Amino acid sequence: MEWPAGEPKKERTHVTVKVQREKMIDIYLRVRLEVPLRKLKLAYCDRVVLDCNEVRFTYDGIRIGDNQTAGDLEMEDGDVIDA
């Protein structure tokens, strides 16, 4: 997308991702790019009443570490995390 001349490009600060789990409802969560994804995992587990110690998040087939951020993984709006 081209930005009009003289108009500054907005810096993204958040992404909205879909967290999906087999046989469960998909949940969309918005997360700041610099916040550790551990917080996203806690919010997801709280919402679907799961023990966070028993849930793994993967993105593009790779396990997400608790201290990784959406910015680290270069996530975009609409990306999917598997739980």
Image: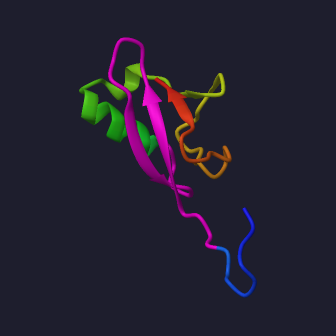
Query: Toward the viewer: 32 or 65?
Result: 32
Q: Position of residue 72 (x, y in %)?
A: 67, 49
Query: Toward the viewer: 24 or 7?
Result: 7
Residue 65, quarter of picture: top right
Based on the picture, tell me whether residue 74 belongs to the magenta stretch: no
Q: Give the magenta-colored segment's residue range.
A: 10-37
Q: Position of residue 17 (x, y in %)?
A: 49, 41
Q: Position of residue 11 (x, y in %)?
A: 62, 70
Query: Toward the viewer: 77 or 54?
Result: 77
> Would you say 19 lies left or right of 46 here?
right
Height in image: 72 above or below 58? below
Residue extending farthest to the bottom is 6
At horizontal 71% and vertical 73% (from top left) the residue drawn is: 3
Q: Position of residue 33 (x, y in %)?
A: 56, 56
Based on the picture, tell me whether residue 25 belongs to the magenta stretch: yes
Residue 7, quarter of picture: bottom right
At horizontal 44% and vertical 31% (from top left) the residue drawn is: 19
